[in-house]
Image (cartoon, rainbow, N blue to C red):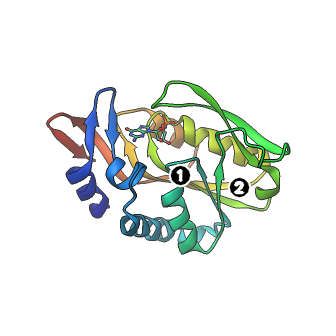
Amino acid sequence: MQLLQDKIRTCGKVYPGNILKVDSFLNHQIDAELMLELGKEIARLYADERVTKVLTIEASGIAIAVMAAAQMRVPMLFAKKNHTKNLCDDVYRTTVTSFTHGVDYDVRVAKSFLHPNDRVLIVDDFLANGAALLGLADLVRQAGATLVGAAIAVEKGFQDGGAKVRAQGIRVESLAIVEEMNEDGIRFR
Ligand code: 5GP
């Protein structure tokens, strides 16, 4: 998606450890108009899939996911990372290894919000090693729901997450795929 590639080129910053910082429009301050365009594109890509729910993970996937869900006129559900009193005990739970922080953490969704008749689209900001996406896919599987695929804003094509997830037969649509990035710049696939 040209709009997203242009934004990454102008505002993204490459950090050591293969981290692309997009704090100015995606991960901290949010460019709401850009998110709306990403949401429209995701809705277009999955228009024929009769999606009933968009699922993401707390926190940075929420902005894109909510825009996609609004376009598709379905609810957006985000898996919670923190153990909160607001979440009942009747949950689906899985463990995810964080790429950016290098630690394992549990994510949960209430069973009451994910059903066997749901057709779920997973949305996230980044795809790196695939742990977040596969964790969300595991929650969908536990619920007995159908996973129609995933939509990712930025796939880092030089890491193995994309190949790993697609090898499981999961459809992955990435709006921008970074082929290579270093201090000299960013090259897209
Ligand atoms: P994965 O689980 O695929 O290894 O990593 C995906 C998660 O890690 C995303 O939800 C995202 O929050 C974070 N992440 C991975 N790579 C990057 C990156 O280069 N920049 C930022 N800002 N977040 C990343």
Q: Which one is nearer the viewer's eye here, 70 or 174?
A: 70
Q: Which mark is residue 96?
A: none
Q: Which residue is at a point 36% across and 40% down the rendered structure image?
A: 156
Q: Position of residue 102 (x, y in %)?
A: 50, 24
Whether 179 is drawn above or below 31: the answer is: above
State how many labels appear. Answer: 2
Dot 1 alpha-carbon crowd within 10 angstroms: few under 14, some 14 to 19, many 20 or more: some
Side (left or right) of 44 relative to 115: left
Q: Which mark is residue 171?
A: 1
Mark 1 element type:
loop
Quarter holding the N terminus?
A: bottom left
Q: Horizontal and vertical percent for residue 157?
A: 36, 40
Residue 161 position in % (x across, y down): 47, 36
Q: Mark 2 near ligand 1 (CB under 8 Å)?
A: no
Sequence-wise, the earlier of marks 2 and 1 is: 2
Residue 137 vs residue 101, the one in the foreground? 101
Q: Is residue 170 above or below residue 32?
A: above
Mark 2 neighbour density, 10 Å: few (under 14) some (14–19) many (20 or more): some
The amino acid type found where label 2 is placed reads Thr
Distance CA(mark 2)–CA(mark 1): 12 Å
Q: Quadrant of residue 83?
A: top right
Q: Please tell me in which quarter of the rendered image ligand 1 is found.
A: top left
Query: Mark 2 sits on what residue?
Result: 146
Answer yes or no: is residue 115 visible. Answer: no
What amino acid is at disc 1? Arg
Query: Is residue 71 visible in this depiction of the protein?
Result: yes
